[in-house]
Amino acid sequence: MSTDYLQLLEDVKQDHSSGASVVAQKAMRCLEALAKEKANAPFAEFTAEVQRVASEILKSQPNMAQLTNLLNAIFVTMENETSSDSLVLSRKIAGEVQRFAENAKKAVAKVAEFGSELIGQDAFVLTHSNSSTILAIIKKAHEEDRAFQVIISESRPVCEGQQRARELSKLGIPTLYLIDAAMAMGVERADVIMLGADSISETALVNKIGTKAICLLAREALVPCYVACDSSKFTPQKLSPKKEPLRDPKEVWKNSPAGTSVENYYFDEVSLDLFTGIITEEGILPPAEMSGKIRAKRMSTKLLEMLK
């Protein structure tokens, strides 16, 4: 893979079909490449470019808390640096990125352990969109020789459910692919619902559009509904984006007729009260405990300015 950070940045900005963890991994590669390429640049030029790239990432992927937490760790590292030496700072940034990646990987593995225990023999597991954390749970249950089936939504407008179905097919896991409008039928057949999250605050989470409808259907059908989310996606409510910008309407309808307005959104905000539990690296937590888990931490002043 190319180490040119500008190419990697464009990949981060244009990825609207992968889950939050995959997008975060791409951002990590971008930032590592930036640190390497700018290690010998003047200090002011280096730090300014880090800030510019961070700003572009946040603008293109505003609902992904894992990116916010990653960038916060880097900005705090920059604020603590006293040497004004680009090479020294580049090494510290690369080390911070690697530490963040290693911790997230370990956390997802623990989430997979706890989540796989919820998938019983011959169960129907319903999921939505393309969460890599949910895929890790499914793989873990499959590795434990449990037989089960997955119900997956198409996940419009990008239809990333197709990608997930291909991945499950390669694993040999039977899969039922449903259009989004048929998710009521899927919920009625499901034994358990597992959803990912792009961010989670004290009272709500942000995930793929359609998540709220699935949760409401699950409540009506009395089907247990869980969200799987490691702590790198925790974020205080005050830092959550206030409103999602409209996306490209052509993703929904390329040639809509005159006088027809098309609104395209990627995300839902969903109250945690609609979930049976939150699967984290610490175990399966009741929604009421989330407020205490999202503790105050040092936030970079520069990052706070960008998030306004």
Image: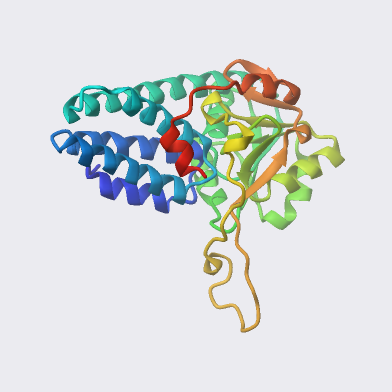
* x and y, in percent, of residue 291 in the image: 69, 24
* x and y, in percent, of residue 156 in the image: 60, 56
Instruction: Report the side of 31 relative to 55 (left or right).
Output: left
Quadrant of the rendering where the N terminus is positioned: top left
- Residue drawn 40% across and 51% down? 13
Instruction: Report the side of 132 relative to 89 (left or right).
Output: right
Question: Where 278 sits versus 265, above or below?
Answer: above
Instruction: Report the side of 13 relative to 7 (left or right).
Output: right
Can residue 135 be seen from the camera position used here?
A: yes
Which one is in front, 29 or 67? Answer: 67
Instruction: Report the side of 44 relative to 72 (left or right).
Output: left
Q: What is the basis of the colouring in this image?
A: rainbow
Which quarter of the figure has residue 118?
top right
Tag count: 0
- Residue drawn 64% across and 50% down? 209
Which quarter of the figure has residue 219?
top right
The residue sitting at the left extreme is: 40
* x and y, in percent, of residue 222 in the image: 85, 35
Question: Where 152 sits versus 65, above or below?
Answer: below
The residue sitting at the top extreme is: 282
- Residue drawn 41% across and 27% down? 73
Can residue 144 be seen from the camera position used here?
A: no
* x and y, in percent, of residue 294 in the image: 61, 23
